[in-house]
Image (cartoon, rainbow, N blue to C red):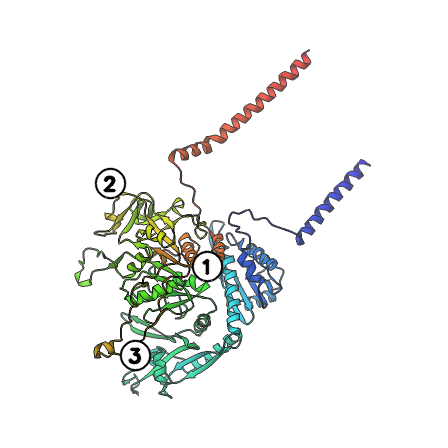
C-alpha cells in the first residue's frame, strides 16, 4: 500500500510539471534586470509597430547551429521579433525560412528558400571559427527583409546583436514615413536619362560597351522601382544628339559632357569630332539630384579610364535619392562651403569612402535616420532643416552669411558646430628637404564665426589641449612592443563626463583628437537667460599648446611643474532664447555678382523700407560647440557606430533634433564599461583579498566546524560518563 501511494505521488508531481511547462509555452513573462533594459523593447519600438497602417512582413533567412559567437544571434533575433509581435498590431508579421540542413525541411525547400533570399539580395556571408585548433570557414545566411506595402528594405548581414533593435525600428519607421510621403505626392517623380546617341560611336574606344542597351535596362529598373514606390515614377529618355535644345538643360543639371577631337582608329577608320552627355536626373517638383552613369578614374601610368556604373548600383542610387527628394525623413543641413570637411558623394554608386580622413561613416549613419541636405550659404539655408552642421570651416564668412546663420538660429533651429583652432598646411614640394620628413605648419583659424559665437557667450581658444591621460600608441621595436603617448589625443574618463544629461548617461569614456578648450561667458549667458551645460572636461593633468605648435610625439613632453596643468572644458550645449547678433546692427547686403562689380551696374528702383525682416529674439534653440572636427572622421567613428565616440556624436545630433527616444534605444548598445578608477592602495587590498581571502576563509570555516564537533564530542562524553 505504501509503495502504491509513493508511485501515485510521483505520477501526480510529474503531471503537474508537464502541465506547468505546457502552460508556460503560451503564458510566459520575462523580467529584464539589466540597467539599460538591453533585452526589452524601448517605448519608441513599441509605438512604431503599434501604429502601422499597412501590413509589414519580415522574412528572416538565418542558418542554424552556427559556431560561437554567432550561435546566439538567431535566438536573440527570435526573442526580439516575438517582443515586436506582442507590442505590434495585426499588421506586424514575421517568418523564419529554413536555409540549412537540420531544420526539418527537405532539400528542395531549402534550395527554394535560398533562391528566395538571393532574389531579395540576401547572400551567404563567410564566417570563420576555430574548431579542433584549426581555423575553418563557413558560408551562412544571416539576413532579413522588410516588406511594407510596395516597399522593400533589407539588412543583408546580421553579425552581432549590438544595435539590432535600433536598426529594425529605424528601418520600420523610415518605411512607414516613406509610404505616407509617397501616397501624398502631388505629382510623379521623373527619372530622366540624358544619353547622347553620339556616344555609341566613341564608346567602344573608351571601354564603354553596352551604351545602346542602357535605355532599355534603365527602363526596366524604373519598372522594378515602381513596384516598390506605388507606381509614382516615370521614365524619360532624352537624346541631346537628336535634340540640341536639350544641351542647355543637361548643363543646368551638371550632366557629364564628353568631347572628342577628330581621330583615326587602328583600322584606319576616321572618327569626326563631337560631344555627348551621359547621366541620370531624378526630379520632383523644383528639386533634383544627378546620378553619374560613367565612372572616370585617372591613373598615373595608364591615363584616364572610363567604365559604366553597374546597373544594380544605379538602382540602389535612384532608390536612395527618392528618399531625399520626397523628404521621407527629417532633414539635416550640412554646410559644404567655407572649407568644411568634405561631404562624401554617396549618390555615386552608393559607395562609402573608407579613407581615415573622410567623414563618410558619420554621413552614412546620419542618412539612416535623416535626409542629409547640402547647404551652401550663397544659395541660402533651405526651409525645413532643423539642425545645421558646420564641421571644421577654414574660410572667412561674410557678414551676410553670418546673418543667415544667425537668423536660422532665431527661428528656433539648432547648430552643431565643430571648430578647429588651427589649419594644417604642408610645405610645398620644392621647399621640402628630401632627407627630412616634412612637418606641417599650424596657422590659427579666423573665419568670423567667432564673433557670432562670442555674442552668444561661447568661445573656442586657438590652442590644443594636451593631456597625460591620453591615447597610447603601440609600436613594434626590435625588442618587442613599446608604447608612445599621443598627448594631443586626451582620454576623457567616466568621472569627467556629465552623466546628468540623458544623452551622456550611458557613455563611460571618450577620446578627443586635436581639440581646443571651449569657454563660456558666464555673465552674458546669465544675463540672456540661457542655460549652458558642460558636457565633459579633460583631466587635471592637461596643459595648452598655443604658440609654436608642433604635434610630433617625439618632441612632446608634459610641463615639469604641476602648477602648469589643469582641467579644461571641451564641449558645451547652450539652450534658450538667443538674442540676435544683428538685433542692433544694419542688415548686411549680399555682395553683387562679379559681372555687376566689373561693370559697376546698380539696380534702379524705389527705396523700400521694411519691418520685421530681422528676428531679434529667437524661439527656444540649441547650440552645440566643440573645439575639433577630427572626431567626425573615419579614424574615430567606427564601422558599426557602437563605440563611445560614435554614440556620443549621434546622440548629440538626435538631441538637437528632439529625438530623445532614439538616444534611449541607442544606449542599449553600450559596449565600453571600464572599471572605476581607484588608488593603488585599494587595488593592492582587493588583490590581496582575492589571492589570500578564499584560503583564509576556508581555514576559518574549518576551524569553526572542528570547534563545533569537538564541543559536541565533549558534551556527549560528559553526558554518558555520568
Q: Is residue 332 left or right of residue 605?
A: right
Residue 220 visible, this orientation: no
What residue is shown with label 3?
606
Residue 453 appears at what percent x and percent y? Answer: 32, 58
The local secondary structure at tag 2 comes to loop
Separation of residues labelled 3 and 2 (CA atoms): 69 Å
Which mark is nearer the camera, 1 or 2? 1
Dot 1, crowdedness within 10 Å: few (<14), some or many (≥20)?
few
Q: Nearer the viewer, mark 3 or mark 1?
A: 3
Which badge, 3 or 2, is on the more N-terminal residue?
2
User: Residue 535: where, in percent of width, then height?
Assistant: 39, 50
Q: What is the quadrant of residue 540 in the picture?
A: top left
Q: What secondary structure is found at the residue carrying circle 1?
A: loop
Residue at the disc numbered 1: 658
Q: Position of residue 534 (x, y in %)?
A: 37, 50
How crowded is the residue under tag 2: few (<14 C-alpha within 10 Å), some, or many (20+)?
Answer: few
Relative to the observer, which residue lies in front, 484 or 340?
340
Query: Residue drawn 52% across and 69% down?
Result: 152
**Left or right placement of residue 410 versus residue 21 in this view:** left
Q: Quadrant of residue 434?
A: bottom left
Q: Find disc 2 in the rendering and name its residue.
A: 560
Is label 3 in a helix, a strand or a loop?
loop
Q: Is residue 78 visible?
A: yes
Spatial CA distance of label 3 from label 1 is 44 Å
Q: Which quadrant: the N terminus?
A: top right
Q: Residue furthest top?
A: 722
Label 3 or label 1, whichever comes before in sequence order = 3
Mark 1 → mark 2, Cα distance in angstroms: 46 Å
Please, is residue 526 above or below residue 107 in the view? Answer: above
Amino acid at each position: 500500500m505504501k509503495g502504491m501511494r509513493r508511485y501515485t505521488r510521483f505520477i501526480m508531481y510529474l503531471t503537474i510539471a508537464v502541465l506547468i511547462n505546457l502552460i508556460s509555452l503560451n503564458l510566459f513573462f520575462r523580467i529584464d534586470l539589466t540597467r539599460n533594459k538591453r533585452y526589452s523593447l524601448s517605448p519608441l519600438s513599441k509605438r512604431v509597430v503599434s501604429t502601422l497602417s499597412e501590413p509589414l512582413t519580415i522574412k528572416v533567412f538565418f542558418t542554424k547551429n552556427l559556431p560561437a559567437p554567432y550561435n546566439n544571434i538567431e535566438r536573440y533575433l527570435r526573442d526580439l521579433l516575438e517582443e515586436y509581435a506582442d507590442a505590434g498590431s495585426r499588421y506586424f508579421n514575421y517568418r523564419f525560412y529554413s536555409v540549412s540542413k537540420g531544420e526539418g525541411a527537405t532539400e528542395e525547400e531549402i534550395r527554394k528558400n535560398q533562391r528566395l533570399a538571393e532574389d531579395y539580395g540576401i547572400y551567404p556571408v563567410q564566417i570563420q571559427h576555430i574548431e579542433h585548433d584549426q581555423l575553418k570557414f563557413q558560408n551562412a545566411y544571416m539576413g532579413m527583409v522588410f516588406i511594407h506595402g510596395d516597399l522593400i528594405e533589407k539588412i543583408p548581414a546580421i553579425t552581432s546583436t549590438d544595435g539590432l533593435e535600433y536598426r529594425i525600428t529605424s528601418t520600420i519607421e523610415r518605411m512607414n514615413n516613406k509610404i505616407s510621403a509617397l501616397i501624398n505626392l502631388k505629382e510623379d517623380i521623373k527619372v530622366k536619362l540624358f544619353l547622347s546617341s553620339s556616344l555609341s560611336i566613341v564608346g567602344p574606344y573608351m571601354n564603354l560597351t553596352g551604351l545602346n542597351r542602357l535605355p532599355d535596362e534603365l527602363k526596366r529598373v524604373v519598372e522594378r522601382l515602381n513596384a516598390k514606390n506605388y507606381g509614382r515614377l516615370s521614365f524619360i529618355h532624352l537624346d541631346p544628339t537628336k535634340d540640341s535644345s536639350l544641351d542647355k538643360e543637361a548643363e543646368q543639371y551638371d550632366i557629364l559632357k564628353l568631347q572628342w577631337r577628330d581621330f583615326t582608329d587602328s583600322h584606319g577608320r576616321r572618327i569626326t569630332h563631337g560631344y555627348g552627355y551621359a547621366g541620370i536626373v531624378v526630379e520632383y517638383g523644383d528639386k533634383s539630384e544627378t546620378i553619374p552613369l560613367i565612372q572616370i578614374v585617372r591613373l598615373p601610368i595608364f591615363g584616364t579610364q572610363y567604365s559604366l556604373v553597374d546597373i544594380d548600383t544605379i538602382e540602389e542610387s535612384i532608390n536612395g535619392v527618392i528618399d531625399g527628394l520626397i523628404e521621407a525623413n527629417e532633414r539635416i543641413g550640412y554646410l559644404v562651403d567655407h572649407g568644411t570637411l568634405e561631404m562624401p558623394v554617396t549618390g555615386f554608386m552608393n559607395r562609402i569612402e573608407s579613407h581615415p580622413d573622410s567623414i563618410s561613416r558619420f554621413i552614412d549613419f546620419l542618412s539612416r535616420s535623416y535626409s542629409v541636405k547640402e547647404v551652401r550659404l550663397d544659395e541660402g539655408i533651405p526651409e525645413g532643416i532643423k539642425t545645421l552642421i558646420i564641421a571644421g570651416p577654414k574660410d572667412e564668412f561674410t557678414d551676410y552669411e553670418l546673418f543667415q546663420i544667425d537668423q536660422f538660429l532665431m527661428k528656433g533651429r539648432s547648430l552643431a558646430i565643430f571648430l578647429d583652432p588651427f589649419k594644417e598646411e604642408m610645405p610645398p614640394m620644392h621647399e621640402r628637404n628630401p632627407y627630412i620628413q616634412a612637418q606641417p605648419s599650424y596657422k590659427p583659424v579666423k573665419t568670423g564665426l567667432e564673433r557670432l559665437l562670442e555674442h552668444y557667450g561661447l568661445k573656442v581658444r586657438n590652442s590644443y589641449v594636451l593631456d597625460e591621460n591620453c591615447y597610447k600608441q603601440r609600436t613594434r621595436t626590435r625588442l618587442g612592443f613599446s608604447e608612445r603617448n599621443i598627448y594631443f589625443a586626451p582620454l576623457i574618463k567616466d568621472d569627467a563626463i556629465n552623466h546628468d544629461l540623458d544623452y551622456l548617461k550611458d557613455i563611460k569614456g571618450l577620446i578627443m583628437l586635436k581639440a581646443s578648450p571651449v569657454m563660456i561667458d558666464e555673465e552674458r549667458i546669465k544675463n540672456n537667460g540661457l542655460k549652458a551645460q558642460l558636457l565633459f572636461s579633460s583631466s587635471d593633468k592637461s596643459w595648452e599648446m598655443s604658440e609654436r605648435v608642433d604635434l610630433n610625439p617625439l618632441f612632446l613632453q608634459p610641463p615639469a611643474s604641476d602648477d602648469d596643468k589643469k582641467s579644461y572644458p571641451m564641449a558645451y550645449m547652450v539652450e534658450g532664447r538667443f538674442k540676435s547678433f544683428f538685433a542692433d546692427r544694419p542688415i548686411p547686403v549680399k555682395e553683387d555678382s562679379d559681372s555687376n562689380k566689373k561693370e559697376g551696374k546698380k539696380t534702379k528702383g524705389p527705396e523700400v523700407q521694411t519691418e520685421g525682416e530681422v528676428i531679434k529674439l529667437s524661439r527656444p534653440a540649441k547650440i552645440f560647440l566643440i573645439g575639433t572636427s577630427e572626431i567626425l572622421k573615419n579614424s574615430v567613428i567606427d564601422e558599426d557606430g557602437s563605440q563611445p565616440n560614435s554614440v556620443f556624436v549621434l546622440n548629440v545630433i538626435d538631441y538637437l533634433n528632439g529625438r530623445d527616444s532614439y538616444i534611449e534605444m541607442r544606449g542599449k548598445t553600450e559596449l565600453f564599461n571600464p572599471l572605476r578608477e581607484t588608488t593603488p592602495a585599494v587595488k593592492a587590498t582587493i588583490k590581496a583579498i582575492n589571492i589570500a581571502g578564499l584560503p583564509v576563509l576556508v581555514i576559518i570555516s574549518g576551524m569553526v566546524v572542528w570547534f563545533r564537533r569537538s564541543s559536541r564530542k565533549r558534551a556527549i562524553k560528559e553526558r554518558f560518563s555520568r
